[in-house]
Image: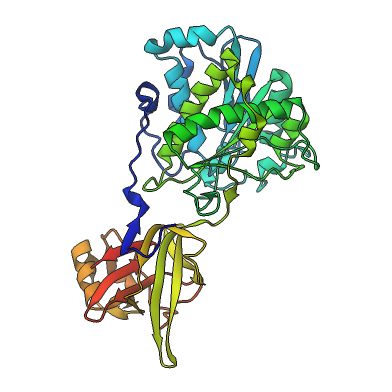
Amino acid sequence: MIRKTILVSLLSYSFSLTAAPIAMHQIKGLNKAAITHADLAPLLDTLAAHPSIERKNLGQSFLGKSIDAFYIGSGPIKVMMWSQMHGDENTASAALTDFLSYAIETKNDAWRENWQKKLSLMIIPMVNPDGAQLQTRFNAQGIDLNRDAKALRTPEGQLLMAAAKVFKPEFGFNLHDQNAYYGAGEQGLPATISVLAPAYNTQREINNSRSNAMKLIAQLSKLVEQTIPGHLAKYNDSYSYRSFGDTFSEMGISTILIESGAYPADPNRQVARKMNRMLYVQMIDELVSGNWQQQEIATYQAIPFNAKDAWVDLLIDDVKINTEKGGYHIDISINNKNQQGHIKELGDISSIRQGFTQLDASKLSYDSGKGFIVSEMKTLTNKQYKALLKQGYSCFNGDLAKLTNNSDWPISSCNKHSAIPKRGAKAHFLLRNDKHIEYAVLGSQLIKL
């Protein structure tokens, strides 16, 4: 467990993928928080021009955007892959685009030709283009597509189900993004890749198709553990009647869920993106060779479960709060949402959670700071902001419209400013020792002064 150090920041992690020819292959322009239909379309147009790739239009989204599938290979082992069913979960969409590009590179011709007549791939890079444009989980009707597998009230859900029934895959890869705060087991590292062989009934029984999914996951898990050790987790397999993964599992498809999660110092999940693409390549090699069939289900079952809320963006450990009634020590956790850091929890936190950035504040005191009055036009740079923080200002009063923030840190109004930390409040406060202010907390950023 990471605690009781002056400053522990997992942002210092380094990431090195050892399989260099695979690891470094990445299409430019997709290292971003949001990926839309307009971002992917020109890239996919270029890829679809290659003779090894066939593109078919499956239909349109609720707002009329094209939803296409891309096919490689003509072999009897059929694999269907789909991504961005939730519009704001785009890591695998980038990874699938990387994979398609990798698969048609001239230097990989021999590899591709080795499996093209043994395996058939169907790839749908973006199932929910409307949600991607709106950056929401839901489609334009406000429906969660992954809760529409039975009712099929969305055009996107209808075409995904129709595609599966026509293609008749043996294996299905359901590709998503997950909450950034999952841990790979209790007190484990951040869950960068989480997997699941979804149940097909409430009893969570294991039939042949689900067993095959578990064995393939077990084989692929070795690559994850070799590349990013300790960052692999497994979802709870409670049966979800309305979900596509569980429904496809009911249909006899060996379905594998891959959820892309957080990795330190990686806001756009490029580590998970690279890991996904490596897994797709490995998946093909395993299915063609048949080596995965020798795996044990016990290996899958041994993967640690996702631990919910195991991580926070910033954890201030054991800071002293001074009040008129006396002092007390607490931990403060802060998470970043929509570019705003808010206090998530107060109390004993460090015993069960870890912070991507974590500070031992046992020798520091909380200072709510004072408000700087904005009365004239002012441009705020990092240097100027830091000077104000050192003077004890943590928020702003007055005419904030006259303030231009050119710094790297957020600004906050002093409205609802509190002398002690409050759950749900915006995080803008100071930490001081006996002599001076040592740190500022602005949003989820810890700034050493």
Q: How many marks?
A: 0
Pick whichever, 339 or 42, lies toward us. 339
Q: At x 55% / y 22%, what residue is drawn?
A: 283
**Is residue 316 among the parts visible in the rendering?**
yes
Residue 37 visible in rendering: no
Question: Residue 160: x and y, percent?
Answer: 67, 30
Where 139 sits versus 407, above or below?
Answer: above
> At which x and y percent is residue 343?
47, 68
Judge by depth and name the residue closer to the eye, 259 or 364: 364
- Would you say 364 lies left or right of 232 here? left
* Relative height, residue 67 to residue 90 (above, below): above
Q: Quadrant of the N terminus?
A: bottom left
Residue located 37% across and 28% down the image: 18
Q: Is residue 201 above or below residue 5?
A: above
> Residue 406: x and y, percent?
26, 60
Task: Give the quadrant of the C terminus.
Answer: bottom left
Residue nearest the observer in this picture, 372 or 443: 443
On screen, residue 26 versus residue 77, left or right, reads left
Relative horizontal placement of residue 275, taking residue 73 as reference (left or right): left
Q: Residue at x 32, y 74 (%)?
A: 430
Residue 168 figure quarter: top right
- The answer to whether residue 90 is above or below residue 415 is above
Position in image of residue 134 (x %, y %): 53, 46
- Residue sitting at 31 percent across and 81 percent down? 370
